[in-house]
Amino acid sequence: MKKPWICLAGIFLAAACLSGCQQKDPKPGDVAGYDPGEEYLSIWVHSIEDTEEGQAYRESVESFNEAFDGKYFADIEFVPRNDSGGGYSDKVNASVMSGGLPDVLTVDGPNVSAYAANGIIQLLGLEEYRYRKPKNLSGGQRQRVALGRAIVKNQKVFLMDEPLSNLDAKLRVSMRTEISKLHRQLGATTIYVTHDQVEAMTMADRIVIMKDGVIQQVGKPMELYDHPKNQFVAGFIGSPQMNFFDVKVEGNLAKFKDGNTLALSEATVNKLKGRQGEMILGIRGEDIKLDEQNLGLNQENHMSAVITDTEVMGNENNLYFEFGGAQAVARVSKYEVSQIGDTIDFVFMPSKIHFFDKDTGVNYTEEA
């Protein structure tokens, strides 16, 4: 069985999974904790050394290990999470920011370490801490120093392990933008490991969704959002997550646990390819519509529920309610104001409904 390879050439790849997503019960000899009998993530960064047509395949563990010898790591920079300051006792100046190795900053001309490091110090908001030692910085500040050490070296490849995990919410948002901008400016390959699906969605060109060390789906952010291959991906991508209901499909009807029924469109019935019985119905909050136009277009599928909770987000509102034997959430316009205890009428957008296998989680409506 040939393993999945992701060939990168200057793209931003996010490897996203739940916290503690390594393979369960790894066996001796497994590569990076992943079972050789399963699909796991193997990455060949061919921006370092191009291969014919940009393709590369690992046929064995030995050849994989041989491919990544010391000469490759010379052009790779690793940014760990929870950086402690790297053992540097100097202050946060150009020397520390260049990792004590100013010679690596000689790119196409004279040494530019001081100039580059000063710019990165300002970019990361560390100007006021310039004369403070890393051991006297907070965790978030030390993490910014680690990020600066990597960026300033102008490497070809960046491996980032949750580099924003210790930053406050406001700085995380600004740093997402800055890292993406720097990635484009440097033209480097960035491999970014995160448990935060918002970081993955907003920063990456491609996302790898993993569960227990096994690849679930690879694709562009909106491909994963609109066309998840299974229930895990559907629930991982999106905030709030997709609504899920236990249903029983009979003919062109989906019956919910509380007795409600939903008439399925002909397109949805065709996607199910004759499948009947118990399934999981999924629909995103923004595809639950309360407005008069959609209620008028889908009169045969009117449903109602009582609001149990609300979240006013400013740009939108989240309305929570019990329906179909589960708690559901509808994402509505900020102008659609409802209160706890109100009864709402709503419809599911027919073209946005997903059906998942109850045991395997496979998305029937996204099968080729």
Image: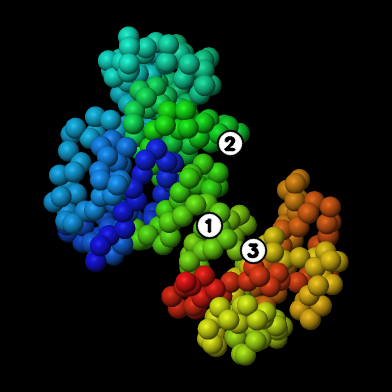
Q: Residues within 10 Å of mark 1 (few under 14, many from 20)?
A: some
Q: Residues within 10 Å of mark 3 (few under 14, many from 20)?
A: many
| Structural distance between the alpha carbons of marks 2 and 3 | 24 Å
Q: Is residue 332 above or below residue 149?
A: below
Q: Is residue 218 above or below residue 54?
A: below
Residue 93 in sight: no
**Residue situated in front as seen by the camera: 2 or 80:** 2
Indicate which disc residue 284 carries: 3
| Structural distance between the alpha carbons of marks 3 and 1 | 14 Å
Q: Which residue is identified by label 2?
A: 173
Q: Which residue is identified by label 1?
A: 223
Whichever of labels 2 and 1 marks the residue nearer the N terminus, that label is 2
Residue 37 appears at what percent x and percent y? 24, 66
Indicate which disc residue 105 carries: none
Which residue is rendered at x = 81% and y = 72% of the image? 297
Residue type at the position of mark 1: Glu
Residue 116 appears at what percent x and percent y? 42, 15
Residue type at the position of mark 3: Arg
